[in-house]
């Protein structure tokens, strides 16, 4: 991957003022290196699926929706610029092999595997009638580009449904203060965001008093990225330490919690950034509504509960060194480290799940959501 440094504090801002972590036009993909934020604006040129895999694994790009889109587009760029002499069957085999490789970059986020499966199915269907390799490649490129467009529309719908639901369920309050964890905004998606998209919608409707964001250690996605987005959009916000969540709630400063999701099981158990479970327990104890905001693609109906979700473990260096593992050593040499990237919040602690199709509030029991029923009704 090649590097382009802009040196501007307005990282990835488009002419319309929104942040942009994925810059794509056919044959070209640039990813905002989120490890450098908020102090540096550096874009990396992604030329093929190997660059895409590395960017995802090294957290140049992160956030479940953004990971899926970056993976799909990295392969689109590769085949767009590839001088290929094989048959349509050869093209299909190449794409499927590359997709299987890309899905191995980060295992917990279901959006990536969902995108890969959809693209794989499209390739197999296209090759049934295609007589040339370029037909297969073109179908793949078109589908990957559509995913980019659809994600922004999906996020805005999540914001609309979430804001509407919160306004109706927190009646009597002129404005509300919302706490969020990790980063779920424009930097984690193709644009606008999921949980942060709801916060943006609340702000635009004049219903938001303040947003609180956690540091989200050890990679500090909250302090580096969410705080950056909130300041950029001029949304009133306060940064807190992860360990201050319960105290903030006890002081009465939080009316609702909204987080994103990397994978939601069929019963509503939700895998999200490590520390989310802690926040959910604190919210439950203090009687505060706890929402998950995510697209339907984050739901994995193939697993019945969170017990089946594979949790990625990150490098020990992220805890042993400052700056998410890139700075100086801060822990004692020789200490053992356990560094899971995600935890699972049980469905019973979740008030509702906000999606682009609406809000899932009906529970099959006290312990589970009827997600399958909601999706079938929403079709």
Image (spheres, rainbow, N blue to C red):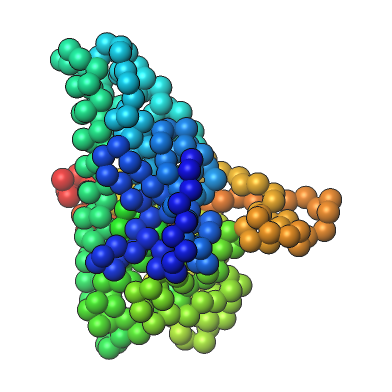
The picture places residue 305, in percent across and down from the top left corner, at: 44, 45
Left or right of 60? Residue 71 is: left
Q: Nearer the viewer, residue 335 or 145?
A: 145
Image position of 192 with respect to 378: above or below: below
Residue at 62%, 57% (x, y): give it: 324
Screen quadrant of the C terminus: top left
The picture places residue 21, in percent across and down from the top left corner, at: 38, 55
Q: Which of 307 and 150 is in front in this view?
A: 150
The picture places residue 370, in percent across and down from the top left corner, at: 30, 50
Left or right of 309? Residue 172 is: left
Image position of 325 with respect to 280: above or below: above
Residue at 36%, 79% (x, y): give it: 235
Q: Nearer the viewer, residue 335 or 374?
A: 335
Q: Is residue 359 visible from the viewing direction of this image?
A: no
Quadrant of the rendered image containing residue 183 = bottom left
Image position of 291 with respect to 171: above or below: above
The picture places residue 264, in percent across and down from the top left corner, at: 39, 49
Quadrant of the rendered image containing residue 97 = top left
Q: Nearer the viewer, residue 260 or 190?
A: 190
Image position of 224 with respect to 52: above or below: below
């Amino acid at each position: 991957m090649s590097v382009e440094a802009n040196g501007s504090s307005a990282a990835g801002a488009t002419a319309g003022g929104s942040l942009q972590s994925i810059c794509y036009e056919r044959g070209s993909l640039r990813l905002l290196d989120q490890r450098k934020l908020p102090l540096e604006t550096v874009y990396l040129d992604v030329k093929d699926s190997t660059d895409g895999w590395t960017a995802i694994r090294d957290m140049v790009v992160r956030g479940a929706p953004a990971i899926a889109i970056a993976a799909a587009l990295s392969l689109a760029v590769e085949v767009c610029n590839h001088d290929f002499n094989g048959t349509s069957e050869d093209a299909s085999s190449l794409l499927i092999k590359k997709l299987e490789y890309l899905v191995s970059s980060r295992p917990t986020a279901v959006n990536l595997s969902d995108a890969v499966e959809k693209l794989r199915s499209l390739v197999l269907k296209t090759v049934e009638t295609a007589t040339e390799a370029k037909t297969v490649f073109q179908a793949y490129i078109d589908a990957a580009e559509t995913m980019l467009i659809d994600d922004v529309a999906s996020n805005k719908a999540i914001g609309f449904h979430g804001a509407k639901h919160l306004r109706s369920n927190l009646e009597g309050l002129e404005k509300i203060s919302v706490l969020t964890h990790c980063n779920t905004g424009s930097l984690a998606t193709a644009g606008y965001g999921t949980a942060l998209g709801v916060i943006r919608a609340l702000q635009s409707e004049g219903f938001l008093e303040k947003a609180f964001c956690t540091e989200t250690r050890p990679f500090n996605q909250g302090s580096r990225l969410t705080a950056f987005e909130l300041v950029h959009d001029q949304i009133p916000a306060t940064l807190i330490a992860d360990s201050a969540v319960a105290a903030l709630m006890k002081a009465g400063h939080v009316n609702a919690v909204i987080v994103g999701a990397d994978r939601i099981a069929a019963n509503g158990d939700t895998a999200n950034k490590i520390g989310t479970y802690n926040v959910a327990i604190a919210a439950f104890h203090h009687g505060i509504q706890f929402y998950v905001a995510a697209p339907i693609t984050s739901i994995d109906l193939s697993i019945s509960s969170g017990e089946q979700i594979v949790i990625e473990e990150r490098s020990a260096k992220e805890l042993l060194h400052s700056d998410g593992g890139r700075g100086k050593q801060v822990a004692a040499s020789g200490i053992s480290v356990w560094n899971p990237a995600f935890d699972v919040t049980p469905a019973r602690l979740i008030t509702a799940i906000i999606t682009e199709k609406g809000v899932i509030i009906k529970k099959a029991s006290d312990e589970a959501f009827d997600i399958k029923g909601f999706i079938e009704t929403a079709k």
